[in-house]
Amino acid sequence: MLKSGVPFIIFAIKIPSTMPANNQPSLFRRPAIFAPFPGLAAAESTRHGGVSPPPYASLNLGFHTDDRPENVLENRRRFLAALGISPDNLATSHQVHGNKVLIARQPGHYEGYDALISDQKGIFVAIGTADCAPILVYDPAREAVAAIHAGWRGTAQQVAKGALLAMQQEFGTRPEDCHAYIGACIDQDNYEVDGNVARHFSAVNKREDTARGKWFVSLKGENKAQLLDMGVPEEQIEVSPYSTWAHNEDYFSHRRENGTTGRMLAAIGLVPRSS
């Protein structure tokens, strides 16, 4: 059953390579920015370690693809088990490239939200991507989290700012307390757009190819700027060095793979304390 939430209006970090001892590619990478918080589970999946065949090879975590649902279920089980998360504790949404924010007070699959926030221990919020920027936020003072999906439309609608504003209103979050991660997404050199898209980006986060009448924009840079503008300290923001296009062997890229590919998940939540 779909559950309703409270709409609001966007947000992000860098990831260390997490390789198993056998040197096989990992199912996920953990943001280094969250390492000081042992009760926090946060990670961004890769495309490795699953059961899906090409073009979804192999850890496709997206149900809104033409992959077999049983493959996606098994892939999600593997990814979440590696993080110590039960699928029953996951809160997700069918994303619509907007700026609505869901206050996730219980797990489930929702409709129409591109950011999910929660202060409930044991609920893990997650968003799916395949070129758009995943942003994870943790407020250790209020023990609140956010998972944000920011493509160019969401970035233009300032979904990251909206998520932080919602956390302020609902949980009393102060941006200066937050730690944020902006994950793997398409890089500026490979994100070609037209002027109608580029106009939503600040001058420092776009460049024009005048000969071709095209622009190249930075999702990472624009979302980081929004976080900084909200008051998140720069030293508390990590930006992934990875690109879904340039590192397509590790990540799904909707644009590079012509729209037929899998999806990653970026998830974050607090593990309940043992009694």
Image (cartoon, rainbow, N blue to C red):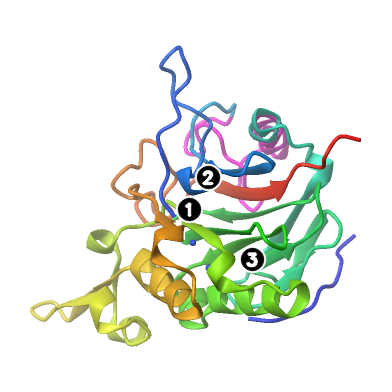
Quadrant of the image occupied by residue 72: top right
* Amino acid found under the numbered disc labelled 1: Ala
SS class, disc 1? loop
Task: Give the camera-side residue of 105 and 97.
Answer: 105
Crowd rating for badge 1 (residues with CA inside 10 Å; few <14, some 14–19, many 20+): many
Q: Which residue is mark 3?
A: 95
Q: Secondary structure at mark 3?
A: loop
Work out how far the residue at label 3 is from the one at label 1, CA to CA, in angstroms: 12 Å
Q: Is residue 10 visible?
A: no
Taking 108 as reference, is 231 above or below it? below
Q: Is residue 270 magenta?
A: no
Which element is circle 2 on? loop
First to last magenta residue range: 52-78
Camera-nearest residue between 139 and 182 = 139
Q: Which residue was labeled with disc 2?
A: 262
Whether tag 1 and tag 2 are in contact, CB under 8 A, the answer is yes
The image's mark for residue 130 is: 1
Q: Residue at x 79, y 57 (%)?
A: 109
Per the model, the C-alpha gap separating discs 1 and 2 is 7 Å
Q: Is residue 65 visible?
A: yes
Can you give x and y, in whole percent of width and height, for residue 178 in the image?
57, 63
